[in-house]
Image: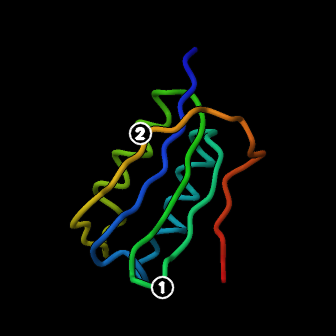
Amino acid sequence: MKMKRIHVYISGRVQGVFFRYTAKELADQLGVTGWIKNLPDGRVEAVVEGEEEKVDEMLEFFHKGPPLARVDKVEVKNEEYKGEFKDFRIIYW
């Protein structure tokens, strides 16, 4: 099984619409690890690691978001898989 890591920035109406919470629920269902947080500029940032197909499912979600969200742009950086996370967490400031 091929492992994958992505670092993502999501722009649009992505804060205050349950984006992080919905992403965490999906990540837990898929068994991927990493984190997600709101940024001061209104974007959402996330790092996701896991099996390639599961990470790709998360990426599909990031392009749509939950029902109240409006995703305008998704910037994706493929990074080297590190296996450094135990679970998927929401980071609160």
Camera-nearest label, 1 or 2: 1
Give the quadrant of the N terminus: top right
Residue in view at x 65 percent, y 45 percent? 33
Q: What residue does disc 2 label?
A: 57
Residue in view at x 49 percent, y 78 percent? 39
Q: Is residue 8 left or right of residue 81?
A: left
Asked if residue 19 is positioned above or below residue 6 in the image, the reply reads below
Q: Which mark is residue 40?
A: 1
Answer whether labels 1 and 2 touch (C-beta < 8 Å).
no
Asked if residue 92 is positioned above or below residue 60 in the image, the reply reads below
* Residue furthest top in the image: 1
Q: Secondary structure at mark 1?
A: loop
Residue in view at x 57 percent, y 49 percent? 27
Give the quadrant of the C terminus: bottom right
Give, as a three-letter code, the residue at label 1.
Answer: Pro
Disc 1 versus disc 2: distance between alpha carbons? 26 Å
